[in-house]
Image: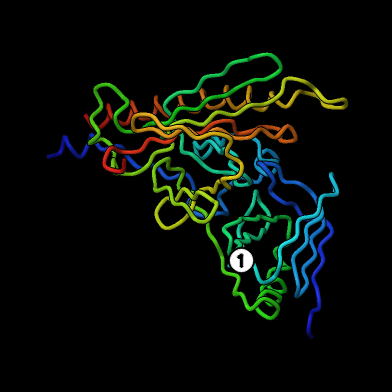
Amino acid sequence: MKMDFLEYSDILSEIKGCMTPGKLKMTDQNIVFKNSKTGKVEQIQANELEDVFFQNFAGSLGLRVFLKNGTLYRFAGFKESEKEKLAKYFSSTYKITALEKELSLKGWNWGTAKFNGSALSFNVGEKSAFEIPLNYVSQCTSGKNEITIEFHQNDDAPVSLMEMRFFIPSNEL
Amino acid sequence: GAKDVEKVRKNNVSYKNANQMPRDSEVKELKLYVDQKYETVILPIYGIPVPFHISTVKNISQSVEGDYTYLRINFFHPGATMGKSDGSYQQPEATFVKELTYRSTNIKEPGEISPPSSNLNTAFRLIKEVQRKFKTREAEEREKED
């Protein structure tokens, strides 16, 4: 059976550290997320899609959507049982194979920082531990063996990440 | 020699797989969570609850400024601890997360039992507790080896 579109009424979109509820609709033309709180609509054109991964977000199945222009979108709140249907939809509609992105759970604070489009990924071994969409960064300064990143604050988040500091070994500078 | 081996920090691992990750509401709500069983602090970083083993935490500090509570977590990294050579790190060439600072409001919304910052207060208390237990155990193990 061919699916013309997929629609989910209770999806969460990661916006500045807050899982923001909304509706997600996918058609052969685009992916549209409508923020339930603000009514704001985010539209991703189908031909802008670079790759899509399944990723676990705070205990629910999520989608990591990466665009050709380097923008990163993260949607969560899907049920594990919907995975197959989603994967089929991505392959038939967008010709994209949605693979699994596993996160590092080692608990280590050392690894490598990699830039991928407009996202910074901190990887432990082959897996990423976390990703920072760079549009959340308000300021970045460097000192001796050190990079400090400050973030835009989101008053909707129960706890908000303010600042992150990295130690960079001398041979990297 | 044997002494050099001993100096290398043991690489404690938080979780072997996703099934071991706690499913508590704090984790799902992207708040700070201290997993006492696995001696791990789970810190939310943009949609992802990120585990940090207690052995990576150097010290923490908390402050209240105006309507906000701040919690700062300092991690171990090379070149910082006096008397500890960089040889004690297995990957001294890596990039290290050195510090994370979280902020939360002290103001209760109508209907809330406790203000959002109570999460940072609880995390502060529990991190200290798990850290103390971990250090005690490590010291005991070192004594046994000697």
The chain holding disc 1 is A
Disc 1 secondary structure class: strand
Give the residue displayed 86% in from the left and 49% down from the top.
A39
Please state which of residues B115 and A147 is positioned toward the viewer in this rendering: A147
Give the residue displayed 28% in from the left and 40% down from the top.
B92
Q: Quadrant of the N terminus of chain A?
A: bottom right
Regarding residue B32, the answer to whether it shows in the image is no
Where on the picture, by quarter, is residue B83? top left
Residue lying at the far front of the rendered structure: A69
Please state which of residues B137 and B101 is positioned toward the viewer in this rendering: B101
Regarding residue A80, the answer to whether it shows in the image is yes
- How far from the left and from the top, in percent, is residue B52? 48, 39
With respect to residue B14, does A167 lie above or below? above
With respect to residue A99, does A161 lie above or below? above
Three-letter residue code for mark 1: Val
Please state which of residues B143 and A71 is positioned toward the viewer in this rendering: A71
Give the residue displayed 57% in from the left and 39% down from the top.
A137
Please state which of residues A59 and B30 is positioned toward the viewer in this rendering: B30
Check disc 1 and report the residue beneath it: A52
- As drawn, is A129 to the left or to the right of B86? right
- As drawn, is A25 to the left or to the right of A100? right
Total numbered circles: 1
Give the residue displayed 39% in from the left and 42% down from the top.
A110
- How far from the left and from the top, in percent, is residue B28? 68, 44
- How far from the left and from the top, in percent, is residue B10? 32, 40
- How far from the left and from the top, in percent, is residue B42? 56, 39
